[in-house]
Amino acid sequence: MKFKVSGSNRESGARMTLEFEAESRAAAERKATNAGMSVNRVEEISEGHVGHAADPSTARRSSGPGSVAKLIQILILLAIIAAVFHFWPQIMHRIRK
């Protein structure tokens, strides 16, 4: 089967598109990775059929429960830092007594 692999060059970050004859999507992705590409997308282009398979590492970048939890953690940390700065003079006053 023939596959079209899209991604970027690992060294320069330039966009790349390569076409490979491979046994499977995974084999096409391995060939592209060995050619120095960070794979974003694999499409099957043989027999007029175009199928898509996203790279698993890019699937985690989408917003989801993990992203929301991370955002909440960051907001809590920022609130704690803001509270410390707000109450810092009072804290120092009590320490000096």
Image: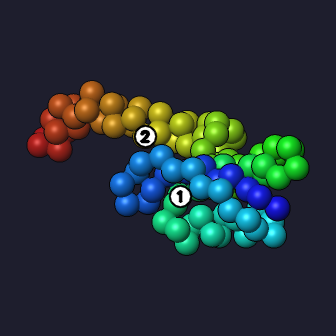
Which quarter of the rendering shows the C terminus? top left
For residue 93, say whether it is visible.
yes
Cα separation between marks 2 and 1: 33 Å
Residue placed farthest to the front in the image? 47
Q: Amino acid at mark 1?
A: Ser
Front residue of 20/73: it is 20
> Mark 2 — residue?
77
Image-based side of 64 in relation to 44, left or right: left
Instruction: Determine the secondary structure under disc 2.
Output: helix
Label 2 environment density (alpha carbons within 10 Å; few <14, some 14–19, many ≥20) = few
The disc at residue 38 is 1
In percent of width and height, residue 60 lies at 65, 49
In percent of width and height, residue 15 lies at 48, 46
Instruction: Determine the secondary structure under disc 1.
Output: strand
Residue placed farthest to the left in the image? 96
The residue at the point 81 percent across, 70 percent down is 23
User: Which quarter of the figure has residue 10?
Assistant: bottom left
The residue at the point 82 percent across, 46 percent down is 51
- Depth-wise, is mark 2 or mark 1 nearer the camera? 1
User: Which quarter of the figure has residue 65?
Assistant: top right
The disc at residue 58 is none
Which quarter of the rendering shows the N terminus? bottom right
For residue 53, say whether it is visible.
no
Image-based side of 56 in relation to 34, left or right: right
Position of 77 relative to 89 (above/below): below
